[in-house]
Amino acid sequence: MSAVAAAAPISGEGLAARRALRDARIRGVVIGLAGLLALLLASSTFGVPAEFMLWIHEQGGDAATIETTVGVLWVTAAIGSGIVAALQLIRGASLRWRPWLFVVIAPWLLALFANLLGGKAAILTNVIAGSLELAFPISMAAMAGILSERSGMLNIALEGKMLIGAFTASVVSSLVFIATGNALLATLVAVVAAMAVAGLTGLLLAWLGIRHKVDQIIAGTVINIGAVGITNFIFLRVLQHNTEYNAPPSVEPMRLPLLADLPVIGPILFSSKPYVYVGYILVIFLTYMIYRTRWGLRLRASGEKPAAAGTVGINVLAIRYRAIFFAGLITGLAGSYLSLATSGSFQMQMTAGKGFIGLAAMIFGAWQPIGAFFAALVFGFSDAVSSLLNILGVGVAPQLLASVPYVVTIIVVAGVVGRVRGPASAGQPYEQG
């Protein structure tokens, strides 16, 4: 009996290894088929021109033009897919395939974009810069989700907290601007208020899930539904009849001195709205804090082995409360972006699923801030391309383009891009000893 018991973990590990190898082979074959499809598309598009422009110093100034054909871009996508497929099949489960996946995605997106343009010129600077701005709320939702789940708490309420943040920011900014006439002060106060309200909403989720052990998915869903109901009611009963309370000053792009003057990358990375710069800093800061500090080690331990963490004196419940509160602050920041920097007012259900898409980016990025940020860029790029194609009058149904982020979300959550293990104790209640 002891021999059988001793062999059980080995057989379990062997089964996991075989599954990982099988998944790797399936992934390699799928990526290889994507390469073959790219070659097939290349055969009929070599005569279609593809022209892209990049602003060198500032928008509307001198531009660098890249001229090629759609077929060449599809060949590039095929080569990238072929390389990654070969690496995946040769190295099997040992390959860290997620970073390599961007070698497939980037040329595929560019080739597909050029194919849809059908020979029309496009300004890549605007598309990439727009992608960064559109990806901001999604990436911030992903950062909030990472903080929460790394501590062991499922945070389905990202959508609701973002919506509450957007509502609070618009109303507070409008009121402060009416009282003072100072746009900068109104914006700063509104952002702080949005973060505070969303943070307190996060504490409500933590209180329900930790203190009363309510199922965390149900608690998050209740908060999402409550956020929609409350904001819709106030919008219809108050803001529609008093539009001055829903007219905040808009947040405009800000050029960073010296950095914005860098050729090509300056107009892309350093001529954006201030929110984007905060996003850069936050992604780097969270990466450092989670993986290079004692706090990060305790956070990860609370989400993986809370019982073991508790035995060495770590206050798991306090860590979870703090993580959910900080996650709420981040989602409030993302919500304020929607009402202050995009639409210029609050609109009903204006988050449009961005909180849930942020969760998909978190999963796709394997609960790592940098990976989730690049995953969010994929969604941002699809939104930016959709807007550009509509402006250029490309013959693609706008409803089809608008559905792309949600289709990708379904694919990611369904695990088609590959299984990934999240924090082991996420969603499980814990009793502090």
Image: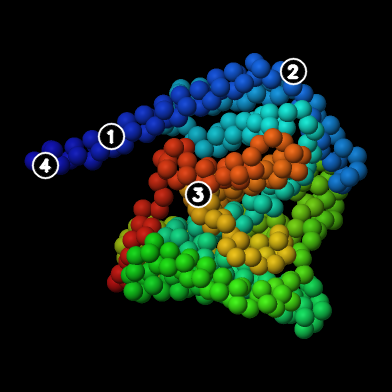
Residue at the far left: name it.
1
Q: CA distance from mark 3 to mark 4?
A: 43 Å
- Mark 2 against mark 4, which lies toward the viewer? 2
Q: CA distance from mark 4 to mark 1?
A: 20 Å
Q: Which residue is mark 1?
A: 15
Query: In this rendering, would 75 be left or right of 99?
Result: right
Task: Determine whether label 1 and label 2 are within 8 Å by CB.
Answer: no
Spot occupied by residue 4 in the image (x, y as percentages of width and height): 13, 38
Characterize the local packing of mark 1: few (<14), some (14-19) or many (20 or more) Cα atoms within 10 angstroms: few
**Which tag, 4 or 1, sits closer to the chain's start?**
4
In the image, residue 108 lies at what x, y percent? 62, 31
From the viewer's perspective, tell me whether residue 49 is left or right of residue 418.
right
Q: Quadrant of the N terminus?
A: top left
- Please tell me whether mark 3 or mark 4 is closer to you in this view: 3
Which residue occupies 67% across, 43% down? 386
Q: Is residue 296 above or below residue 400?
A: below
Q: Which residue is mark 4?
A: 2
Q: Amino acid at mark 4?
A: Ser
| 355 and 184: which is toward the camera | 355
Residue drawn at (60%, 77%) of the image? 237
Which residue carries the number 3 mark?
A: 360
| Kind of residue at badge 2 | Gly
